[in-house]
Amino acid sequence: MHSSNKTGISMKFWAILINSAFPLSYFMIFYFRIDAKLFYQAQQPVFFFHWPFIQSFTTYAGGLNELLAAFLTQFFYRTWSGAVLLTILFACIALVSYLLIRRLKNRSPVLFLHWLPTLFLFILLHDYDFPLAVTTGFVLALLAAVLFIYSNFYNIIFRGGIFIGLYTVLYYITGGPALLFVAIVLLYDLIYQQKVILPAIYLGFAFFVPLFSSAFLFIQTRGSAYFLNLGLPGEGFAFWPAFFLLFFFPALVLFFGLGARAPFSTITRTKCVQAFFSERTTLTIVVQICIAFVLSGAGTLFFAQKKQQAMLTVDYAAEHHLWQHVIEVVQNGHLLDTYIGRYQLNRALYFTGQLCESMFAFPQVAGYPGLFMPENIRHLFPIQYSDLFYDLGLINEAQHWAHEALSVTGDTPRNLQRLALVYILKKEYAAAQKCLALLSRTSRYKRWANQLADVIEKKDFSSYPKLKQLDGLMLKSDFIVIPSQPEVCLEELLSVNNHNKMAYEYYMMGLLLDGKVGRFMNRLEGLQHIHYQQTPRHFEEAILMYMMNTGRRDFAPPPAGLSANTIAAFQDYIGILKKYNNPTAAYRELAAKYGNTYWFYASYIYQKDQ
Amino acid sequence: MRLKPYAGFLFLLFCISCSVHKPVREHNAPINRLPTIEPDYTDIVLPPNSAPMNFIVQEAATAYYVEFSAKTGKSLVVSSSSPSIRIPFRPWKELLNKNRGHTLQITVYIRDQHKAWHSFQPILNEIAADDIQPYLAYRLIKPLYVYWDQMGLYQRDLTSFRERPIILNRTTGGNCVNCHSFHNYNPDRFLFHMRAGEVGTAMMLAYDGNIYKIDTSTSFNRATAYRAWHPNGQIVAFSANTVNQFFHTVGENRDVYDKASDLVLYNVANNMITSCPDIATSERMETYPEWSPDGKYLYFCATDGLQVYDPEGEHPYRQIKYDLMRIPFDAATNFWGSVEPVLLASEFGQSVTHPKVSPDGQYVLFCMSSYGNFSIYKQDADLYLLDTQTKEYDRLYLLNSDKTESYHSWSRDGRWIVFSSKREDGVCARPYFSHVDASGHFSKPYVLPQKNPAFYRTFFKTYNIPEFISGPVRVRPQKLARSAWDNNNVIKANLDPKLGERVEESEDPMWKPVQKGRKKI
């Protein structure tokens, strides 16, 4: 790099500033804004220190890179380690890019040019499903390209030999990203080394090796043999960043290689281009830096996956029983219009003791499916659906959906943990031990697995109160689960154990959501088994409404009676209705004053949906 | 000091110091019981061409010394500081081969914390005179509920540890591959089904080097399922089932019943689906076809159609019990006889599945459980043997466990059987082998040996439909996958004009592929 520019400010200063500002910013954003642990939550990566697991990645081109990514993704378990990992990977990319650019042109025309590919990756990483294998594959391909370009063998045989060796190894390790390597070295040799035969050989290799390997060596489709983890635009992630990332280096080789030659020189030698790219003044540097920040800022704003982030945050919080956080994020993350948002919200309301108190403070427009996800999305959230049955004590259904999760998301620790617990509860210890044996081969869950193995050995649940509690809730007699009627399961659970508070509340609130107030009233006697200090507010609201609508008093009165506040509120509610003499006209005032009551739900939301 | 000249000597010293010495017999303190080993390879009959039966000694010790000896040949010794005993391949093969029909004695010595050696009672296993067929084909799949992801058909060399895929569904768009079947153990003639996904529902038929993709559904039958090759290699009997899966709240939570099922025949030569009224009646559900080795009888399981049950009453799944039937058939003239009952299991409250006739035609090995036809989900499913002459049957106590025993097949010479059992953990089925002697007695079964004896502790897949084959499948998986994707050359099966149309509208399938891609909420 040149030591100074026209203003006299040391170029070293700018270089240090840029090379420290970028990684620092990345770390901060991955830590504070993107929250790197959510990658773990989204992808649920699996990595076992277990030879059969490792061996399974050796059976196809690109497998070893996926194995590396699977290992590295474990760092996403914590926000800080995930942020550090991504920052290091980005720094690696910048370093390799810097070496590559330096070989192409003595002096980089843009100070942060080597950080530019990381900007595209950074934008792509706003999508939590973006696989780390694309990033690691990209790093390895660039590294191979640098090794090749810096090798000083120009004899056609040596150079060809080096290419074949590097390409073959790279292809086996990374799969698709080897194509990027070929594109870079092909253009480099064609333009910079003025060679024709070798690039033709490279092209032939890039075409025939995946073809041959998918036909004879590895059992993988042709598409995957060519493009696995290349991060092709149009694979479901942000198109333009993926496009720029992929074509950045080939375009750079073309630009630097052909820029000085006609006819391109007519463009590259214009004053404007010269001023921006060649003359390093403070102004151009500041402009360049501003462009970098604008680019990243615009990318962040445009490609941010806010809803996905909120959803994953809720999932994380629910998994770790941070129920108040679930409620906050569902509200603030605009997830109330999603089934999964409502489902997790209602779980959180139950666990914070608010289900029967404040459930209607949240828009329950989904009705009953807000408690139990609708059937058509359950397979998308199988382990989350299993959570509900596990908490309810319906262990067979928890097992069913944990197994579905095993098919949908793989042998993730979360799925294996659930299965281990389920099989322990079902006293099927050999099956539980299988899950624990797998978990003991992970770095993070080894201890947990060993503790559970102790539980099995001693057949003693005392150190796991949750297991002890669930053991008492489990069903004793068999019946067939009707997926569309989960309330039947709740009835059965209550018939086994009428102290099952969760089953009772879900059952009763389900009846209210479904408008089945008559059946709700018939099950009021269940209140005496749950021991509420006060009758839950929504129960009171339903009772008052029922009494007014039917004039009947033939039901089991709640042991704690009805509160004077609720009665007064109901009278006020009726008063407002009467005042307007028209429910539609009364809507606005009632929504403002009683929008959080069952009366309002029953009058406006439930009826509207029906 | 120059160590190089002594390096070899030092290395030898190091090795000696690290090695486990042979226990001196006089100092042995005998333990008067058999050692506990995993997998349980005690009191078994093993094939002389078996892969080494590696095992773990489940006895706490600081060192292990295991001696394998037989009547002739040199003893084989494995010493180890870990309880995992891995037997060297060649000496094992030599020892077994030289001692066909004799006893293999396995003596396990362990060294305790005080460096004293103890020997257990020797394990005495019989080496059969008969080789086992060299290959086994099976499907590997995670315990399946509704959604599946990765699965594949595999072949395992039983004389070594080599396992290779026949087809992996990751190359066929993640569809379901199932119900593989080989004609007369021939690895060059086999079929399997594919369901769902982009490649579509079809049967893949590999026949003497050629591969065909065949749509076996017609206006008479849905896509075919359970299958049996006629010995002539021209006809395949199929069942076409409408399957329904449901879930229990206590015990094994998966269950399946058929809403309807019939048998049809597919003729490979003329690509025609045919049937006869007695095996495709709507009054009865027929399933699990199986030919007698001479091809003169088609065995199958049958039960009443669901219409006999009160549609308003309780779900009848527990009342659905299958009998074992057979029907005479002449392949040359296409003549069908009348259906004959073989075992009316429903009369004593049981249900028969998977009848498999021994190669000499003398026995039928079958599964029996309390109800239904999906024995792999029934914990009480056990194996039984029926004598075709006397029609007497027996529960095979030595083969069965308190968990599921299900799909099974005979070796070509009828001296070995392989069957699926969930005895290990109740969740994943494993292939177990048993020797059958000339008088029809079965030996204690043993699980498929693995290189790593702890393999099954962490292997969370189930072995589905284990079938013997006489050699490796030579068709490459890549070629099968290419043919699977070739939707331009799907052969549509013709329907015998004598059969009328009767298929109802399509139904929602009970097993579904995992939907890849973004979550839509």
Image (cartoon, coloured by chain):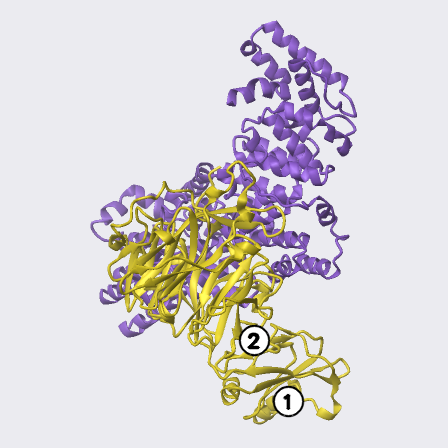
Q: Quadrant of residue B136?
A: bottom left
Q: Which chain is purple?
A: A
In percent of width and height, residue A492 lies at 65, 39
List the residue tagged with mark 2.
Answer: B443
Q: Can you say whether A342 is above or below B161 in the image?
A: above
Mark 2 neighbour density, 10 Å: few (under 14) some (14–19) many (20 or more): many
Q: Mark 2: which amino acid?
A: Ser
- Subunit of mark 2? B
Q: Earlier in the sequence, mark 2 or mark 1?
A: 1
Query: Is residue B254 toward the left or the right of residue A571 in the image?
Result: left
Amino acid type shown at disc 1? Ile
**Residue appearing at x 79%, y 29% in the figure:** A533
Location of residue B282 with respect to B64 vertically, above or below: above
Question: In this picture, is A172 found above or below A572?
Answer: below
Q: Identify the mark at residue B16; answer none if there is no mark.
A: 1
Q: Check the residue under mark 1 and report the chain it is in.
A: B
